[in-house]
Structure formats: C-alpha cells, structure tokens
Image (cartoon, rainbow, N blue to C red):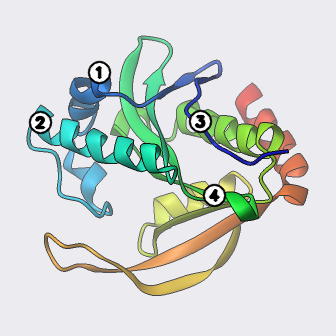
C-alpha cells in the first residue's frame, strides 16, 4: 500500500471536511473572529479576509509541496465553515503524519463536530492510507485541547520544550505530544463510534 495522503472530501453525519481552497477564505475569516481561538495558535489573528486568503495560500503551497493536506471544517446542518484542520508533517517513507492546525469557532467546540472530524481523519489515515503512526501536539498549557486529544484515544508521549517561537510576540511554546499507532486504532475506533452514536 502506497502511503500518499492527497486532498479528499471526508463526510460524516455532523461535519464535512472539504479540501481547503480560496473559496473558503470568507467563511474561515468569519469563523475566526472570537479572540479565544487565537490564544494558543502560532500565527497572528486574521484582521481581514485578505489575511485568511494569505493563510490559505500558504497552506496550499504546503499541499503542493506534499507536506500538508488542509481541510475546511464545514458544519453539515447549515453549511457554515466553522474552522479548519489538516494533515501535516507527512512522512511517506515512514507511513506517519500529524493532525493539526485544528481550530473552530467556539460554538462548534465540544460538539460532535470535532470528535467526528478527528474520527474521519484517523479512519482515513489508518484504513485507507495505511498509516502506522498519527501524532497530535498542542500547547502544553492548553488544558482543553490536551483533554480532547486524550478523549479520542491518543497516548501522551511527553513535553517538547521550547518547541515553537511565536514570531509576532515572542511567546516560547512548550508542546505536549500525543500519538496513536495502527494497533491502537481498532479500540479507539469503537470508542469514538460509541461517542458519536449518542
């Protein structure tokens, strides 16, 4: 099996993960207006739709280079773009990748949307692509994100100290690293499907 993540539409009951495009810029900007979204992100908040467009351009350059597969997170009930997520740090020879750059507007958080989005991405990576390892990382101080990653079945691996420097304000981020491997996916899949069935 060739491990080669490419843009793809992933769809569940609550969420549709659409391959990110410039057509999502306005929706992504509207999803980003709450300052709470930006507390732990490594980039400056979008001030205009043009900022969102520039960010999408950069994500698409990563896609063209083969390092990233970005998605727009779309709520199925009303078709609204509520955020974004992506596969990144794609390591084809080692059949591994990271799920990250995940953020969404506050009213979509702690709903079935994020759980289902992670489920769809994990299932696709393990079952269709043949991934051996999927990792997620977050700011070590982001308790909500750390709890959410554990809740989907990932294992905590440790803290990477001063892993990221936020250029616009000098914040030095320690990152909490988590992972799931292929042999853990069947159990995690059952648990996620039980959560989504509620």
Tell me the residue at 67%/73% (across/down): 156
Tell me the residue at 63%/57% (across/down): 97
Q: Quadrant of the N terminus?
A: top right
Q: Which mark is residue 159?
A: none
**Front residue (pair 128, 146):** 128
Tell me the residue at 37%/30% (across/down): 82
Q: Earlier in the sequence, mark 4 or mark 2?
A: 2
Marks 2 and 1, how far apart in space?
12 Å
Side of 139 relative to 116 (left or right): left
Of circles 4 and 3, the one toward us is 4
Tell me the residue at 71%/31% (across/down): 196
Q: Which mark is residue 50?
A: 2
**Front residue (pair 126, 93):** 93
Marks 4 and 1, how far apart in space?
26 Å
Q: Secondary structure at mark 2?
A: helix
Q: Which mark is residue 23?
A: 1
Residue 41's place in the image compared with 140, above or below, is above
Of circles 3 and 2, the one toward us is 2
Q: Earlier in the sequence, mark 4 or mark 1?
A: 1
The residue that label 3 is drawn on is: 117
Q: Are marks 4 and 1 in contact (CB under 8 Å)?
A: no
Residue 85 at x, y = what percent? 47, 43
Residue 106 at x, y = what percent? 35, 39
The residue that label 4 is drawn on is: 97
């Amino acid at each position: 099996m060739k491990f080669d993540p490419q843009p793809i539409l992933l769809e569940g009951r609550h969420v549709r993960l659409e391959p990110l495009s410039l057509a999502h810029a306005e929706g992504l900007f509207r999803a980003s207006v709450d300052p709470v979204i930006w507390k732990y992100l490594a980039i400056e908040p979008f001030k205009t739709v043009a900022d969102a467009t520039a960010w999408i351009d950069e994500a698409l350059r990563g896609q063209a280079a083969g390092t990233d597969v970005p998605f727009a997170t779309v709520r199925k009930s009303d078709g609204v773009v509520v955020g974004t997520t992506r596969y990144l740090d794609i390591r084809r020879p080692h059949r591994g990748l990271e799920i990250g750059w995940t953020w969404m507007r506050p009213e979509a958080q702690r709903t079935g949307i994020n759980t289902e989005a992670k489920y769809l991405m994990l299932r696709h990576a393990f079952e269709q692509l043949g991934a051996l390892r999927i990792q997620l990382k977050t700011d070590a101080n982001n308790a909500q994100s750390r709890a959410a990653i554990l809740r989907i079945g990932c294992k905590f691996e440790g803290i990477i100290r001063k892993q990221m420097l936020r250029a616009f304000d000098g914040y030095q981020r320690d990152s909490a690293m988590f992972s799931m491997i292929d042999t853990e996916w069947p159990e995690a899949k059952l648990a996620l499907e039980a959560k989504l069935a509620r």
